[in-house]
Image (cartoon, rainbow, N blue to C red):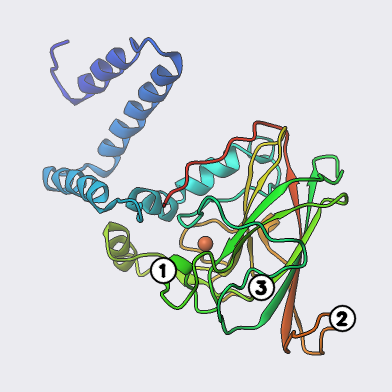
Amino acid sequence: MIIKASNDVTTAVVAVMERTPDRRLQEIMVSLVRHLHAFVRDVRLTETEFREAAAIINEMGKLTSDTHNETVLMAGSLGVSSLVCLLNNGDDGNTETSQSLLGPFWRMHSPPVPNGGTIVRSDTPGDPLLVTGRVIDRDGRPIQGAEVDIWHASPVGLYEQQDPNQADMNLRGKFTTDADGCFWFRTVRMAGYPIPTGGVVGRLLAAQNRHPYRPAHLHALILKEGYKVLISQVYDPDDPHIDSDVQFGVTRALLGDYIRHDDPHPSESGVTTPWYSLDYTFTMAPGEAVLPRPPIK
Ligand SMILES: [Fe+2]
């Protein structure tokens, strides 16, 4: 097709996309081109802005490595990761779900810990946190033998591999649910933390006067044959950034009941005051138990 005016471009490109043999790829590319062209028209993108956009995408690729993923960070900062998660879970996005973002800090092969054990592996000053979790199916029945991988940031907001003061695999552990679907452990109360701001995402946040913080949260990845892998985060409602998460990951279903206790713990020894408790129930949906690819090594 020989182009006469700007509208012809969209017609010509969509016609080419429609000839894509793979049906799903065809659907995606036709829609992508329509939306992309509409966007360019909507903002009347200038030639300078177009060249800047290409440079930014190139920069995101160059900033991405084995230990950092700038593209995933940008997807989160634009709310795309959260939207994809919600649309693909909770009855196609219509109901609440325990699913959340994986985040960039999950590591495979965290060490097994017996229920009642601790995931504090090196001196980590902070308030004690006693977690009890339960894993159930959509009908409310307990799921026994589920493998629950837990990880979280320290009380100063750093994951172990970001912090030379923490032992390898500190604040990480893998539990197995009992006959009631329960698992429980001791740790320290985590803090919220800023996402990395040294790249393109950091410049965007600065340009929009946005803070870079994620509210404090506990990560869980739950594996059980016959169920879709449950990737979850349980957020602390008392965090000052609970309603302004830079990655838009906080949903109502993921608000945890982090309770402060000022009296000594009734049975556990060595629990200083104040201490905190968290009790949360994870709901798994039927599906394929396929682990995600770890975002870092
Ligand atoms: Fe996190």
- Residues 284 and 290: in front is 290
The answer to whether one can see residue 232 in this image is yes
- Residue located beneath label 3 in the image: 187
Give the residue drawn at x 58%, y 61%: 151
In percent of width and height, residue 259 lies at 75, 76
Q: Earlier in the sequence, mark 1 or mark 2?
A: 1
In percent of width and height, residue 4 lies at 13, 17
The crowding category of the residue bearing disc 1, from other C-alpha atoms within 10 Å (few below 14, some 14 to 19, many at least 20), is few
Give the residue drawn at x 87%, y 83%: 266
Name which residue type carries label 3.
Thr
State how far apart marks 3 and 1 are (Cα): 18 Å
Quadrant in the picture for residue 25: top left
The relative height of residue 180 versus residue 246 in the rendered view (above or below) is above
Q: Which mark is residue 162?
A: 1
- Residues 136 and 210: in front is 136
The crowding category of the residue bearing disc 2, from other C-alpha atoms within 10 Å (few below 14, some 14 to 19, many at least 20), is few
Q: Earlier in the sequence, mark 2 or mark 3?
A: 3
Name which residue type carries label 2.
Ser
- In-image side of 41 versus 223 (left or right): left
Q: Are marks 1 and 2 in contact (CB under 8 Å)?
A: no
Quadrant in the picture for residue 251: bottom right
- In-image side of 34 versus 108 (left or right): left
Q: Which SS class for mark 3?
A: strand
- Residue located beneath label 2 in the image: 267
State how far apart marks 1 and 2 are (Cα): 34 Å
- In-image side of 287 versus 152 (left or right): right
